[in-house]
Image: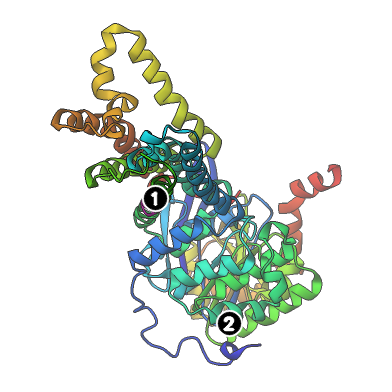
Amino acid sequence: MTATASNPLTTDPDFRQVPRVPLSRLCRVELRKSWDTRAGLWLLIGIGVITAAIVVIFLLVADSRDTTWDNFLGATTLPQNILLPVLGVLLVTSEWSQRTWLVTFTLEPNRSRIAVAKVVATLVLAFAAVLLALAVSALATALAAVFFDAGGIWNLSGGDFGDIVVAQLMAVLQGVAFGMLIMTSAAAIVALFALPLAWTILVNLVTALNDLRDWLDLQTTNIALFEHTMDAEAWAKLGVSVAVWVLLPLVLGTIRLLRREVKSA
Amino acid sequence: MIVIEGLTKRYGDHTAVDDVSFHAEPGRVTGFLGPNGAGKSTTMRMTVGLTPPSRGHSTVLDAPYSQLANPGRNVGVLLDASAQHAGRTGREVLTLGAMVMGLPGERVDAMLELVGLTSTESKRRVGNYSLGMRQRLGIAHALLGDPRVLILDEPANGLDPAGIHWMRGLLRDFAERGGTVLLSSHLLHEIEVIADELVVIGRGRIVAQGPKAELLHAAGTLVRALDSAALKSALDQSGIAVVATRAGDALIADANTEQVGRAAAAERVVLTELRAAEGAGLEQMFLSLTADDSREEVTA
């Protein structure tokens, strides 16, 4: 039927000497999976459009003295901080809901390598989202400089940009972790937002828990990140809360992914 | 070459697969036959490392599947044709597979052509495919890496008679080139058309295995002994071939009852059963195995 049909399969004595699939290739495949479905593509487009829209709105409504690069970029952080974890969740949970683990894990039986590829792919996507935010906010700053008297101030420092990169990478990583741990899209997304929110409310209401809030509530500890007021103590507090809310779920989720039986139906 | 030895899978009290052992040899199409829920898929999932076995082990090309580097280049696997992202196009599904395996893009076109999916069809989303088209896509995916072994779970499901005929040609050609094929089905007539060797499973246990011709038109003698190994060697010494096995260590010997009886007596083997194997025994056995399922079909 094709050119492959005539030659025998077993002539090559070294057919088993195929090298292992390089991790870089697995990462590229996982990255591709983020946009090669309609749902995935629209989520990415959505993140891009919302990022651009929020900057445009800020440009239209802000006082001209506030039209700084730093503020434009700052406006994009909250929507991206909400949407990027969803992206992370879906890149993992869709493999369960669409049952594509059957294929993913038969082509690469070493599941930990797939877990690493998923994490790398989502980190790349999050970084790309922040770069897009940086570019759009630079464009807005340039426009503000042209159209407003006191506007368009190029005040963004490398450190400020770094803070935002850290915040968004953490957010997307938390999404991957919850996706691995909870495995179904809806439940993982609800848990991703409801659990931290419930915890934030609890530790703020109960005075006795205020120490816990300062060290273990990510919504409290990352404020300094968004306000660019990080110091040694703030990094320590952030580190502890990230360990609990991001790294711990990531470790538990990875263990679950490695052990879980993959069934077809 | 696929070797399955003593594979067992328990879910709590339920034993889904119970001590299953068989070989699938190169150059042969081995059919794995059994009613729905008999343990075929679980056995296949254990073979490719998706389900950890409770006991036993398996190798594909002399290695546990999970230790194969880039397994797609050596083993083509289709476990569930519908287990593809509904929002991905058929071509994209193959492209992802080709990327992982490190294959050029032309391989995708070649496989689409081989399974008869047109360019237009390949650009549609899998969610809009019929089951038959998904099976063809799944076969294309399994063949992408030019493998030596094919493991296909219910690949003929959803294919029309012409499609089944096509698959027979494809798999026969693959086997004739030295490939190993293990495919499962819950339909006797489907397997009859495609397979050379049969492994019949019911309620998690293998109930018969051997060449298709022998099992379907079982002539010869059904013989059972207290010591099955001794019986085998007794038959062997008398030059009587064992053509198939049945549940409970029974053997189907290629000789009449007297010849088998003499062979056993010569080696002082105690027989517990000795009778002519009835014709169409496989069909009878399969009907009794599927009785539960057919009752469901009537009421459904």
Using the image, determine if residue A64 lies above or below residue B222: above
Q: Amino acid at mark 1?
A: Ala
Q: Position of residue A212 (x, y in %)?
A: 26, 18
Q: Which residues are magenta?
A: A122-135
Q: How many marks?
A: 2
| Labels 2 and 1 share a subunit | no
**Horizontally, is A170 left or right of A49 in the view?**
left
Numbered disc 2: secondary structure: helix
Q: Can you see residue B217? A: no
- Per the image, the residue denoted by label 1 is A142
Question: Residue B175 has which mark?
Answer: 2
Q: Quadrant of residue B169?
A: bottom right
User: In the image, B25: left or right of A121?
Assistant: right
Q: Is residue A128 magenta?
A: yes
Residue B191, image x, y percentages: 70, 69
Tell me the kind of residue under disc 2: Ala
**SS for tag 1?**
helix
> What is the chief secondary structure element of the magenta stretch?
helix
Residue B44, image x, y percentages: 53, 59
- Tell me if label 2 and label 1 are in contact, CB under 8 Å: no
Query: Which of A124 and B211 lies nearest the eye of the viewer?
Result: A124
Residue A248: image location, x then y, percent: 30, 35
Chain to which mark 1 belongs: A
Instruction: Kindly identify the residue that appears in the image at 71 percent across and 53 percent down.
Output: B289
